[in-house]
Amino acid sequence: MTVLSESTAPPPDGINPSRARDVVRALYGRPPLTAAALSAPLLCLPDGDEGQGSLPGSVQLSDVPATVARWAELGINGTKLFAFGHDRDNRASGAVTLGNRMIRTIEAVKQTAPRTAVTTEVCGCSWTDHGQCVLRTDAGEIDLEATYNLMGTMAVMHAEAGADVVSPTAMLDGSVAAVRRALDDEGHRDVGVNPNLAIHTTLYGPFKALMRTDPRAGHRRGLQLEPGRAQQDTILQARRWTAEGADSLTLQPVMTTGDVLVRLRDDQRVPIVAYSTSGEWAALQALGPAGMTEYLAMLVRSGADQVLTFAAQTVAEYLEASRA
Ligand SMILES: [Zn+2]
């Protein structure tokens, strides 16, 4: 009889039984990524806009049904909508005009794919002539009351058109509470509020160029989180958002903030969407579908409940082909 050694280390024979047999690997394993973890951004552009197709999901309104039908067929159950504002002024009036491009996009998605969860961007920057997310007073200060009012009205209009979740993206403190209150007052208590945790980055570039949302003067850094303090500030901001009534959160970008995602997951129990932004798509193309899949799987392992990514269709098609 062998006496057990004090060491618990297995003998160095080169075999690890929990990995050696394929039936055991299958028993203990789980797929690192499925299409159900993916959401796709949908950017609705004016008819004939030359930017169509420059990012996956950048289409004109008449192409929305075919686009979301394909996503639903692949098992992509969520989309986040952005609309190019055509008539822009300094009060973002187009954002709260009945039948605007966002409203028609929401309706088109829900008519085609009623089981697709629709999240909408609620922000001024696609609709202001100065390209800023917020409205300003004549003196140039943020007009808080008017901005809250704009965002609350947008949210209610999106909810009435069929949106399931609205996403105040401007990172303006108080905006989540304003949107939550506006939804509740109009009887949309079951519509979710998912604000942004946006860290300053160059990885927003292609989206801003396509949607023409770069502020004409200055930048929006005062409303974004600073990269050097991102771990601490993201957690503080997440706590403020949930205190204001957020029931889920979006972190962006994610290619350069994996550490922040892990810390945020440890701190928060609400669903977290990891938004792999437009500049990430540009970088991801060198990886190809297999490499993109590994990258998105890392985001899920790091704690994302959903990954919002321009690579959603490419990766879902790759996953489908890998199963076949
Ligand atoms: Zn904005």
Image (tube, rainbow, N blue to C red):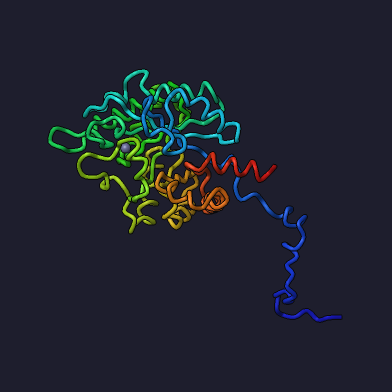
- Residue 196, located in which quarter of the rendered image? top left
Vertical side of 193 occupied by 105: above or below? above
Please state the horizontal and vertical placement of residue 28, each as a whole percent of the image.
Answer: 71, 55
Vertical side of 319 occupied by 93: above or below? above
Q: Residue at x 31, y 47 (%)?
A: 224
Please state the horizontal and vertical placement of residue 117, each as a whole percent of the image.
Answer: 52, 31
Please state the horizontal and vertical placement of residue 128, each as a whole percent of the image.
Answer: 25, 31
**Residue nearest the observer in this picture, 185 or 85:** 85
Identify the residue at the far top of this view: 98
In the picture, measured across the screen, residue 322 lies left or right of residue 135, that is right
In the picture, measured across the screen, residue 283 lies left or right of residue 34, that is left
Q: If the image is split into quadrants, where does the C terminus sit?
A: top right
* Callout count: 0
Q: Is residue 159 visible?
A: no
Q: Residue at x 45, y 46 (%)?
A: 281
Please state the horizontal and vertical placement of residue 230, each as a whole percent of the image.
Answer: 36, 55
Vertical side of 286 occupied by 309: above or below? above
Identify the residue at the far right of this view: 1
Vertical side of 124 occupied by 228: above or below? below
Q: If the image is split into quadrants, where does the N terminus sit?
A: bottom right
Identify the residue at the far left of this view: 139
Q: Is residue 23 visible?
A: yes
Q: Residue at x 39, y 56 (%)?
A: 231
**Residue nearest the observer in this picture, 125 or 52:** 52
Rendered-image quarter of ligand 1: top left
